[in-house]
């Protein structure tokens, strides 16, 4: 009888623990036990680019909402350098305790580790996505004084003078570069591709007239576009951009090209406990669902869009399979 009483008491205690959520995966127990995160803890959101860059602006929109849900200080930290290698390496090698996560945008991160010359020291398996909260359609832009006032005249000039029309990227083997190579391959074009150290440098070169055209996420061109310093010729998508609704799509202009976009994925080091990942995923999703956050994202010319941890992982894997052969072909051209 005594034994039965002890067992019953233990069962009641276990049930009470489950009902209160103590130690449950939904709350995140953390690698050393106890609720994750501890009240007042500091979590670093690492942005591998400069303050004021697109990813940095979005991080500072979303971080306060995550902070409120987590009950911890979510601090945005910029670690620029090496075409994002510095910041991404910092995240990959951080302690897997959930207190460090970073911006790992897909597809831009792919060129950082698929190109051996960059000596990244990390791969896709170095990270576990928390989730994704926004996407950015790719657009093609020119200087306001450009002789090319529509996408047809630009592409006709490229065909008339192969290898001479200058197109800028934010880095070698980065997403701009890969997208330009895909355009060349699918549309039978040949650009004179010029690499810059960052997206900001690329946009500055376009505004100054140093480049004939460039492509990139609509948010990276949006300020200059609204100010009238740049003209957008096309959106590389099947649907118009809500941020530039009068700009035609490549499809509507008669060019058959798969849509191009950037997805804003957040990731932790790969060995972070699953329950901690789940807790961070829940906080990111709640932040994404916040109406004020969504309006601010749209104000930054970025479309709110949710992907779970597992769906972000699948997207990353699929894009890697698509882009890896393009980078391998690029490397063979040395």
Image (cartoon, grey):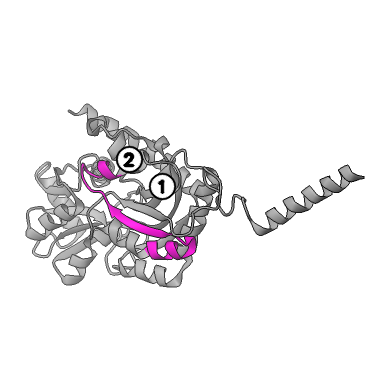
Does 86 lie within the magenta span? yes
Q: Is residue 60 left or right of residue 149?
A: right
Residue 70 included in the magenta stretch of the image: yes
Is residue 172 shown to the viewer in this render?
Answer: yes
Q: For this rendering, which residue is in front, 96 or 146?
A: 96
Q: Residue at x 25, y 32 (%)?
A: 119
Residue range corresponding to the magenta coloring: 62-87
**Vertical placement of 4 versus 321: above or below?**
below
Percent x, y of residue 168: 16, 49
Q: Position of residue 118 (x, y in %)?
A: 23, 34
Q: Position of residue 159 (x, y in %)?
A: 15, 46
Tally the numbered discs.
2
Q: Measuring from the top left, give residue 327's x and y in whole percent.
A: 28, 34
* Residue at the image position 27 percent from the left and 61 percent from the top: 219
- Mark identifier at residue 91: none
Residue occupying the point 52% across, 47% down: 30
Q: Quadrant of residue 185?
A: top left
Secondary element at image label 1: strand
Of callouts 2 and 1, the N-terminal one: 2
SS for callout 2: helix
Q: Quadrant of the N terminus?
A: top right
Horizontal side of 18 relative to 143 (left or right) equals: right
Which residue sits at x=78%, y=49%?
11
- The residue beneath circle 1 is 267
Near mark 2 (Cα within 10 A), the count class, few <14, some 14-19 or many ≥20, is: many
Q: Which mark is residue 110?
A: 2
- Front position in the image: 74 or 214: 74
Alpha-carbon span between mark 2 and mark 1? 14 Å
Q: Nearer the viewer, mark 2 or mark 1?
A: 1
């Amino acid at each position: 009888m005594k034994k039965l009483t002890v067992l019953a008491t233990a069962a009641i205690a276990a049930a009470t623990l489950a009902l209160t959520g103590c130690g449950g995966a939904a709350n995140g127990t953390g690698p050393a036990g106890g609720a994750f995160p501890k009240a007042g803890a500091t979590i670093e959101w690492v942005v591998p680019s400069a303050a004021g860059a697109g990813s940095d602006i979005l991080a500072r929109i979303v971080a306060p909402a995550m902070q409120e849900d987590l009950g911890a200080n979510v601090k945005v930290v910029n670690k620029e350098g090496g075409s994002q290698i510095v910041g991404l390496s910092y995240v990959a090698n951080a302690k897997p305790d959930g207190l460090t996560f970073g911006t790992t945008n897909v597809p831009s991160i792919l060129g950082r580790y698929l190109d051996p010359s960059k000596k990244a020291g990390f791969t896709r398996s170095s990270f576990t996505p928390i989730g994704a909260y926004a996407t950015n359609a790719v657009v093609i832009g020119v200087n306001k004084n450009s002789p090319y006032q529509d996408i047809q005249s630009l592409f006709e000039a490229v065909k008339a003078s192969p290898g001479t029309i200058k197109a800028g990227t934010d880095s070698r083997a980065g997403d701009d570069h890969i997208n330009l190579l895909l355009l060349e391959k699918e549309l039978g074009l040949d650009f004179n591709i010029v690499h810059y150290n960052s997206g900001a440098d690329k946009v500055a070169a376009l505004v100054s007239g140093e480049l004939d055209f460039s492509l990139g996420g609509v948010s990276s061109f949006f300020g200059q576009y609204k100010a009238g310093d740049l003209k957008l010729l096309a959106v590389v998508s099947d649907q118009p951009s809500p941020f530039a609704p009068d700009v035609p799509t490549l499809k509507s202009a008669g060019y058959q090209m798969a849509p191009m976009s950037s997805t804003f994925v957040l990731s932790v080091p790969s060995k972070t406990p699953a329950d901690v990942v789940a807790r961070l995923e829940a906080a990111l999703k709640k932040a994404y669902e916040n109406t004020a956050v969504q309006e601010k994202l749209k104000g930054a010319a970025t479309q709110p869009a949710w992907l779970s941890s597992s769906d972000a992982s699948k997207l990353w894997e699929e894009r890697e399979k698509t882009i890896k052969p393009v980078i391998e072909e690029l490397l063979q051209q040395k």
